[in-house]
Image (spheres, rainbow, N blue to C red):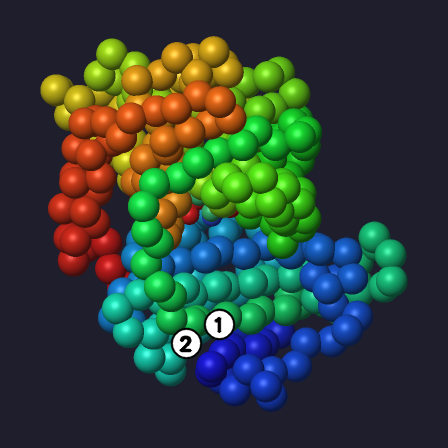
Amino acid sequence: MTMWVGTGGVGELVHDEQARVSALDHGFTVGDGIFETMKLVHGRVFLLSWHLERLHESARVMRIALPTNATLTSVVRRVAAANDCGALGRLRLTITAGVGPLGSSRNAVPPTVTCAATAMAPRLGSATLQYAGWPRNERSPLAGVKSTSYSENVLALAEATAAGASEALFLNTRDEICECTGANIFIVRDGVAFTPPATAGLLRGITRRFVLTLATADLDVREAVLTRSDLESADEVFLTSTFQEVRPVTRIGDHAFAEGPITAELAKRFAIQASSPSCWT
Ligand code: PMP
């Protein structure tokens, strides 16, 4: 794989085996970084401007000085062009606080920037969920930040998959429905699709944002605070994420759900709207 490795706005394309980041990088030692994962289809990037917007929001909270959007766009395009990922690829842009001391303080250095892309197999079928064993802290400064500190997600997903589920679902400290380790959640009740608001402590998914734009006069899609009983009594449940797109959920713990018509309609609308050339860079 050919990837980008740089410091601030300066860097180079290299083979991943030649790519070098310092072992003292604060991303490596303390998880002090942010990232974006983007969908590539035949080398074109889906909703790049939305990903850059979210990256800027993460960078603002984490006080990481980003290279310009022109630089980031050029890095993304060059990595997309340098790797033939075919029909579906995953492009990841990672930006850390750079080389730092061996503790939590930082050095005043430019950020480390890496970008890589690999081919992916499309995901298949519906999802099953298990509740995570601890809450998402909606009061954490990292709530809503796409931080490289993903260890809580790694642990929760490992527990869920060991129990035979495909995803773990987090409640927050108020026992509201929050999100999964790599996806946002929607429920359908009486023909209306609801998803928790950002105040629940979730990552504002690019796909969630796109699905919220699919509402029409005859199909309401909106944000609402949701409880566990709202979820368990829902008519339909589905996940959204860059690679799962709109994916039905058929089980949460002991509760089974049918794959329903609103989920199918939103999946269809998603596919139609997402094929617009304006979504692709
Ligand atoms: N929540 C979390 C914690 C995630 O990691 C992701 C995947 N990036 C999502 C939600 C869904 O976001 P997106 O639609 O941007 O992939």
The residue positioned 40% from the left and 58% from the top of the image is 38
Tell me where residue 264 sits by quadrant: top left
Image quadrant holding the C terminus, namely bottom left
The residue positioned 61% from the left and 58% from the top of the image is 65
Q: Are marks 2 and 1 in contact (CB under 8 Å)?
A: yes
The residue beneath circle 1 is 116
The residue positioned 59% from the left and 17% from the top of the image is 175
The residue beneath circle 2 is 79
Q: Is residue 33 visible?
A: yes
Eyeballing the image, is 1 above or below 202?
A: below
Circle 1 — which element?
strand
On the image, the x and y values in percent for residue 170 come to 57, 30
Q: Is residue 103 left or right of residue 228?
A: right
Q: Is residue 196 left or right of residue 95?
A: left
State how far apart marks 2 and 1 are (Cα): 7 Å
- The amino acid pointed to by label 1 is Ala
Circle 2 — which element?
helix
